[in-house]
Amino acid sequence: MRNKLVLILLYVFVDVLGFSLILPLLPYYATSFGASSTVVGLLLAANAVTQFVGAPLLGRLSDRYGRRPLLLVSLMGTVAAFLMLGLAKSLWMLFLSRIVDGLLGGNISLAQAYITDITSDRDRARGLGFIGAAFGFGFIFGPAIGGTLAAHGNYALPALLAAGLSAINLVGIWLWLPESLPPAKRTQMAQSPGTAITARALWAALRRPCVGPLLNLRLFFGLAFTMFQTVFAIFAQKRLGYDAQATSYVLTYVGILVVAVQGFGIALLTRRLSDKQLIFGGSIALSLSLLAWAFTPSLWVLLIVLAPIALSGGVLGVVSNSALTKSVQPEEYGGTLGLSSALDSLTRVVSPIVGGFLIDRVGAGGPGILGTLLMAGLALFAWRRILFVPDLSCPAPDSLPRP
């Protein structure tokens, strides 16, 4: 298991490194083709909307046909998308790149399903936390490298480098990563109602009493935390006067925090507290942290405030997915994590629009205030629907009444 874990974590690191090379630069890249702020928002939303459709389908298909084939398909899409981005000569090519990446780019949710296959319930949160740490390592180096390469407005170079890194990842998965689902298990999953690839089956999963509260948690946590992430560059520009390069360096610091939290902090916390306790405590901590962020007056205060935001956000992101995998049957891991990823994508459509509107109408602190209210409400929801529920697990799919 250890070799598989190392390989999949290395895959996540390289994948995120490529993604984070271009992420902070994409709005500036679109502006170089004459895009307005509204068009930039639509560009970011296009990727999220298509991922909302693609991620659950990739997850369900991986339950039936295995994680490795779907990882390879997803990476092929990522390579193609970054090549389009690097070779773009017009704005429509940027949109096409983001759409292709959204439909086929369910890399992280597939990696989470792979980790779920090879870990026990006891070690699940720790394993998913390692994915978060690999994600953080990617964000330590990616934004800084991308910002340096694009210092003179050469936004194509980071995109082409990202395509090269994704191609290396594709070859590595092809040569070295073994399948986590043996053929007999895939056959069993293909015959299970829990892996049906229909909108009706996905809606039925949302209505199940064990899964519904946790997916609601993912949705509202995602709205608050994604708003912080997606408008952070605008916040830094409006409140602190930072440009793209300076913002990339602050995001590198955030990457270091994420590694510390998810590589070490979550392992310590999950030994002492249950998933439900961490969900409730993380909701309260994130609510207070976002309130402090809303009123941050300077760089040094911001660096201090980012620590509890990274801690509480990292804990909620990992532990909520860990609880989701424990609430369903093994044949539903990929589809359920795909649903979680789809909700994350939905928040990436809504949150940038709402956050940008609040900054324009209320000021730079507006997104932090709304995020505080959302997380305070979520803490109350967790208190009533999650913390004191004795068992969050579901019956097997074939024992459920048909919707």
Image: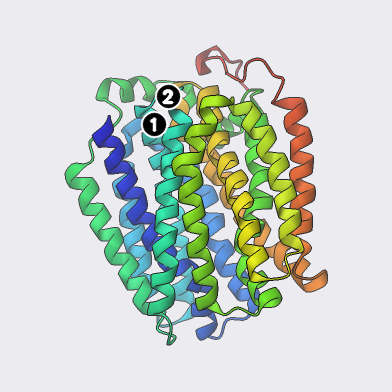
Residue for badge 1: 63
Tell me which corner region of the image, top left, top right, bottom left or bottom right, holds residue 164: bottom left
Q: Identify the image quadrant of residue 234.
A: bottom right
Check residue 387 in the rendering and tell me which mark sits there, or answer none: none
Report x, y in % for residue 35.
Answer: 57, 81
Tell me how far mark 1 sits from mark 2, CA to CA.
6 Å
Side (left or right) of 364 relative to 259: right
Q: Quadrant of residue 27?
A: bottom right
> Is the residue under label 2 in contact with that under label 1 (CB below 8 Å)?
yes
Instruction: Quickly name the residue at label 2.
Output: 331
Q: Amino acid at mark 2?
A: Glu
Answer above or below: position of 285 versus 390. Answer: below
Front position in the image: 395 or 158: 158
In this image, 27 relative to 391: left or right?
left
Which mark sits nearer the N-terminus, 1 or 2? 1
The quadrant of the image that shows the C terminus is top right
Height in image: 24 above or below 105?
A: below
